[in-house]
Amino acid sequence: MYDIKSKKAEEFIDDDEIQKTILYARQNKSNKENIQAILKKAKEYKGLSHREAAVLLECDLDEENQKIFKLAKDIKQKFYGNRIVMFAPLYLSNYCVNGCLYCPYHYKNKNIMRKKLTREDIIKEVTALQDMGHKRLAIESGEDPVNNPIEYILDCIKTIYSVKHKNGSIRRVNVNIAATTVENYRKLKEAGIGTYILFQETYNKKAYEKLHPTGPKSNYAYHTEAMDRAMEGGIDDVGVGVLFGLNMYRYDFVGLLMHAEHLETTMGVGPHTISVPRIRPADDINPDDFSNAVPDEIFEKIVAVLRIAVPYTGMIISTRESQKTRERVLELGISQISGGSKTSVGGYAEEEKEEDNSSQFEVEDRRTLDEVVNWLLKLGYIPSFCTACYREGRTGDRFMSLVKAGQIANCCQPNALMTLKEYLMDYASEDTRKKGDEIIENEISNIVSDMVREIAVKNIAEIEKGERDFRF
Ligand code: SF4
Ligand code: SF4
């Protein structure tokens, strides 16, 4: 039975409630009065319930759909402004004991080369990432208690933070590793991580069990309850997501929102981020084997309705998506993107040889970070290398209350401009530098507070003289 406050996965992600929600949404897809009432509520910028959001996703009225997209854009602008936060994934190890059917790292795959970064490898990788201009990483690793125990992950984090190459430094390490114990989450917290990210893949228990036939990840409840344990272990910011294409998107869309509602109700704070990956080709994996492919128009609508339903949650898109798709969803709600990504183990320091074949999936957007930054500037966004919040203790409910009060933009805007200036000084091509300086000049006047604006102007002048790492 559905119980949002329950600690049991099958109760806070109740199958019956999801089925009823899908049915309710279908029955209301042309109900103009209901859809307009939901949109009216959404305009208060306080979010929507999973049932209301499901109706908007299903809505088949053209005029109302236009309003949905318009509202998503307005919310994006109100809460996040023009800044787009940049990050890169760093693959530590592709050893894995799980049998996930959609991932080439599954233990039965003998085609890929198994690799695990040593301390020296990490120093090389992080140096290469710093030379690109990255300040924020998401570390990724397969699950393998022998090859990648928690001590290995903790050592990697320590090494990453220790590398200081020229003006570079990694200032925030987000962690995407398998579901683990409260005790291990506590250790990650002590290691100074930013967000703990774990994708549910699918919320449908039956589909989940089919897709995860063997290994510790096959335990649906242990996986689904991971965020509760992470928060119990003291991690304030957690990032959720599903792999669209594995299962019916309607089901996972509703499950995702129910998960967010559960965390907000029981832990006092909802997810910090939502990621929206779609399944991609990879070694030993054929996306056609998964018959739930999500077409672009539906994918765009998913992003727009998520933006409306959880306005306080950052949304992330990776280089799995093409430039065209990324461009479209940026305006509808995405606030964080990766750039210049390599999805192989050790791919930054050295281009991987074809025969090594250690990557997790094919990247669609293969541009360099500078090309991505240049493109964002051309579109009028401010590429931001900001990592300020968790370093200033703005995490969990402290962070959420600032976002809900519409005040986080007061930090995001100046931080985006200052960190962009650092990027332009240290790493950008000439054309990117020119475009970036123009944006900084135009956008600085949009900082609302006189005091903050004056400090930002002063700091940018200091950055020009060689100082680094200012933040609000
Ligand atoms: Fe291992 Fe994760 Fe791939 Fe599953 S998705 S095989 S757990 S790396
Ligand atoms: Fe993110 Fe906080 Fe920086 Fe804004 S100020 S970009 S919310 S880290």
Image: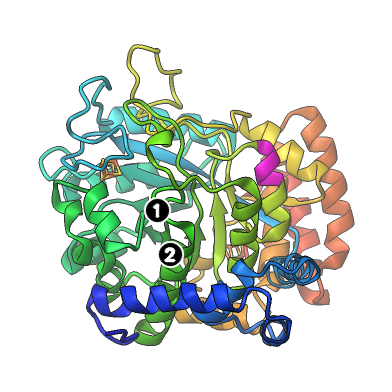
Q: Judge from the rendering whether residue 86 lies leftward or rightward of residue 466; answer left or right.
A: left
Location of ligand 1 given as a quarter of the image:
top left
Residue 469 visible at all: no
**Considering the image in quadrants, where does the N terminus appear?**
bottom left
Circle 1: element type: loop
Q: Amino acid at mark 2?
A: Tyr
Please tell me whether residue 249 is drawn above or below residue 261 in the rendered image: above
Q: Residue at x 59, y 75 (%)?
A: 55
| Residue 197 position within the rendered picture, expressed as x and y whole percent measured from the top left | 38, 57
| Residue 86 position within the rendered picture, expressed as x and y whole percent measured from the top left | 59, 48
Circle 2: element type: helix
Q: In this orientation, which residue lies closer to the viewer: 295 or 346?
A: 295
Contact? badges 2 and 1 (CB < 8 Å): yes
Please tell me whether residue 425 is drawn above or below residue 243 in the rendered image: above
Residue 177 visible at all: yes
Q: How is the image coloured?
A: rainbow
Q: Main secondary structure of the magenta part?
A: helix
Please tell me whether residue 363 is drawn above or below residue 338 in the rendered image: above
Query: Which numbered circle lies on residue 131?
Result: none
Q: Residue at x 57, y 39 (%)?
A: 167
Q: Judge from the rendering whether residue 257 lies leftward or rightward of residue 465; answer left or right.
A: left
Q: Residue at x 82, y 30 (%)?
A: 431
Q: In this orientation, which residue lies closer to the viewer: 277 or 158?
A: 277
Residue under numbered circle 2 = 251
The range drawn in magenta is 323-327
Q: Amino acid at mark 1?
A: Asn
Residue under numbered circle 1 = 247
Is 109 magenta? The answer is no
C-alpha distance separating marks 2 and 1: 8 Å
| Residue 330 position within the rendered picture, expressed as x and y whole percent measured from the top left | 69, 53
- Number of marks present in the image shown: 2
Quarter of the figure with residue 179? bottom left
